[in-house]
Image (spheres, grey):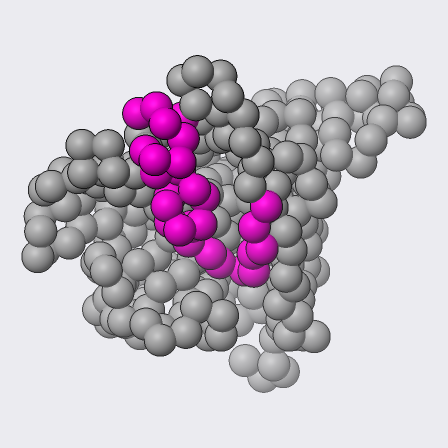
Amino acid sequence: MKKLAVLLTFCLVIGLFAGISSAQVIVNNLNEPGSLLVFPLIDNIFHTTIIEIANRAPTDVWLQCYMITHGANSATVFDKKDFFIHLTQKEPFWWSTNQPYNRVDAHGVATQIMGFAGRKGCMFCWAIDSDKTQLEIDWDFLKGDAMLYNSGNGRAWQYNAIPHQGLAVVGDRVLNLDGVEYTASSSEILFEGFAEGFSGIGGTLALCNLNINFILSTQPKYDINFECWNQNEVAGTRHLGAIQFNQYDLTRDLQLAINQVFTPKWQCATAPSAWALWAVFFQWTGGLAWGSNVWQHPAFGTPTTVVLPVVPSGS
């Protein structure tokens, strides 16, 4: 009933506002389960990342996932590896991503995943009909989270996986996060924090972009415009390049150190663009760390397409 109401609302909006901008699409709801989950940061270089995915449905489901990562010596060349997860009904799946995962569940189904030690990047998973045909399905029963910890200094923090709800999912090996098939992501994100250097605080913004064509092997570059304000309401812009996954240091990249913004606190927003953004922001000082999802502007949904590889015949 909820999805029917959403679809009817969407049709009414299109009918009443035929000339509306393409940016006005249905944005994902961060507080509801989805059919597709995005983990904007998997870090097994400076941290260890543990993920959890819960299947809230009373029946089993298959997930297909892609891990997009780079190694310690390269932040521009990405490996893209897929794997499958079989979730039983009501199961909370738990995996330390730096280690291989090998399990046969109560139904005799095996889930086997390689480890990603020494890798950093992002990950996304979506519900499919089976590991053989691999066609995406509407399955708004998935929720997830990630915990990152450093055993050397004891710092740990957690964020929620970003869900995309299914609206009118078509099993065609193309993930249209466009507000029609799946909900879209926002191109304007908002986040705030402490200036780097204030009380010894550091910080990083991690961004992921899912505009991917696995058949053509495209890896588009794009630009992001930030506007930031300090506690005296003084504004300043930053213009940065990006690729499929980036991390931005507060001092070196975003120029948000205490001697650059002059007040302990600041807030930033990205200008709406043609690029959808999935992001988390975290900070630390001493033995403490804290982080979270960023805010999404609901009025600036941006369509994104993930073209998946063709399933080999006989698989």
Across and down, in percent, residue 236 comes to 54, 31
Snapshot quadrant of residue 98: bottom left
Residue at point 49%, 58% (across, down): 245
Q: Residue furthest right?
A: 19
Is any atom of residue 233 visible in this view?
A: yes
Magenta highlight range = 239-266
Snapshot quadrant of residue 84: bottom left
Decide if residue 231 is on the left or right side of residue 25.
Answer: left
Across and down, in percent, residue 177 comes to 65, 46
Who is closer to the viewer here, 150 or 254? Answer: 254
Who is closer to the viewer here, 66 or 276? Answer: 276
Residue at point 67%, 31% (across, down): 300
Image quarter of the N terminus: top right
Across and down, in percent, residue 133 comes to 58, 68
Residue at point 56%, 56% (across, down): 242
Q: Is residue 58 magenta?
A: no
Residue at point 64%, 55% (across, down): 222
Q: Is residue 253 magenta?
A: yes
With respect to residue 137, does 134 lie above or below? below
Who is closer to the viewer here, 252 or 57? Answer: 252
Who is closer to the viewer here, 8 or 198? Answer: 198
